Image (tube, grey):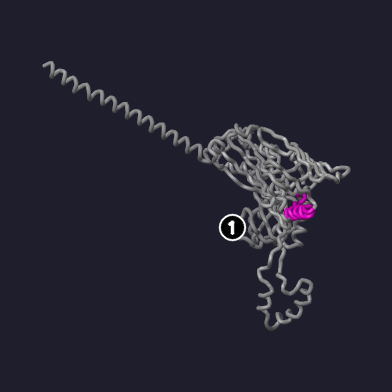
Amino acid sequence: MKFLASALLALVFVPVESALGQESALDRRALESTSSGLEKTAAAQNSDPQNILRGFKSYYIKSDTIYLHPDTLLKELQKRGEFTAWELTATEDSKAADVVITITLPFLTWEWNYRMVYQPTGTVLGTGKVSAAVEKTAAPQLAATIVERIRSARPLPASFQDAQGTPQAPVDSRADKEKSWKVRYISGPAPHLRKDTLVTLTVNREWMTVRNSKTLAFSAPVRNLSVVDSRTEVRKATKGWEDFWDSTGTGETSLIIFVAPIFLAGEGILAPIKTTDHFVNMYWVEDGASKGAEFRVSAGDAKSLLTELNKVTGREAQDLHGSSEERLKLIAERFDASPIVETDRQVNIGWRSLAPGAYRLVVLPREKNLAEIYFFPANFRGGSFNAKDVAADAVVEFDRRKTSVEDKAAPSVSYREQNGIVMFSQIEADALILRFTPIPLGLGK
């Protein structure tokens, strides 16, 4: 009997202990599964751009171009009612910010790019670009574009009244002394229009309107036109002289055969046919978004259109092509006579790293005792220039020597180090002194 009782107790005891152990294990697995699920959900939310845009609180502006100071864009963002309504806070500590907004401007272009990144996960929240000649016109457009991206995911409080709304011009709106031009639509806020569609562009003191036949395609109040610029492009014509000669035969075309050599004598009959295209661009803010339109116009119309826009807006048009050409011309003129600078260590300049070696230093003086400087590898031969040719560039303080030091064999270089980063302190040549000190970058044209 004692044996049977002990056996029964053992039989009862063992399963109960096992069941409790299984239940405990199941609870642990369920808890771990739930925790894992919550973590995955949280991770998914933290990597989803829309969720991040709806909830981030702080931001930091980083400028990777010498032509835009972070404070300039910061002020434009703080002017926006949306940033106040969203209670977004700018921080001076990049590591403490939820979101970093980086601005870049590729060398010899006028396309200002922005990139928003959520720091904890490296998630890209948005990218975009605007066209402008200088920071004072680029900053408002960048601010509008950034706000538009955030608004696509983040609702505004019901109490917020959007003051940026732009009503469309009535189809029959008229104003005194309006002028119209027949132009080719290249791009803009009218996706139903094909590229190179012939449209009528009308400008008066109140509105800029674009009509396809008699239908209004789009419009904008003149007061909202923040930037107007122009550019020209020289390209080879679609048809060359070989096509011209092949098409000649009898009739009128035969007569041209005898005329063509006379007016082509200076260029040579076999020279390729080239054509020049003129473009006018307009940019404005509408419903919190930066918008723009580009038109191809004749040389005469380009001049008259820009003159009229200047009259009604009170702002001079920026010639982007001309500005780039002028900078290239100045670099080419100064290139061969520019000094060779040698550095025996890696140096951070601007937002790039300059490797040890010899460089030709081209200096373009600007206003307020400032200068643009460009470092080219010493073995670079010049001629044509592009972004890949420039090793580094910056804006620095600039002084001309009152008396040149002609016996200076080579420019002298001094350095400074901050937080383990080596930078130039000063470069001194026979005719100039460049000081690499922190300077305000709120530069004009």
Q: How crowded is mark 1: few (under 14 residues within 10 Å), some or many (20 or more)?
A: few
Residue found at x 75% / y 62%: 299
Q: Height in image: 297 above or below 242? A: above
Please, what is the three-letter code of the amino acid marked with disc 1? Answer: His
Residue 204 seen: no
Q: Image check: 18 left or right of 192? A: left
| Disc 1: which residue | 192
Image quadrant in which you'd find residue 153:
top right
The single residue placed furthest to the left in the displayed view is 1
Asked if the stretch drawn in magenta spans residue 75, the answer is: no
Q: In this picture, is 397 found above or below 179?
A: above
Magenta residue check for 335:
yes
Query: Does residue 47 appear in this view?
Result: yes
Asked where in the image residue 251 lies, by quadrant, the reply is: bottom right
- Check disc 1 and report its element: helix, strand or loop: loop
Question: Looking at this rendering, what residue extends furthest in the bottom direction?
Answer: 250
Residue 213 in the image: x percent, y percent? 65, 62
In this picture, which residue range is highlighted in magenta? 313-336
**Which of 341 and 195 lies nearest the eye of the viewer?**
341
The picture places residue 193, in percent across and down from the top left corner, at: 61, 59
Q: Quadrant of the N terminus?
A: top left
Q: Which residue is rendered at x = 79% and y = 45% of the image? A: 410
Q: Decide if residue 70 is on the left or right side of residue 15.
A: right
Q: Relative to 325, is 394 above or below? A: above
Q: How many marks?
A: 1
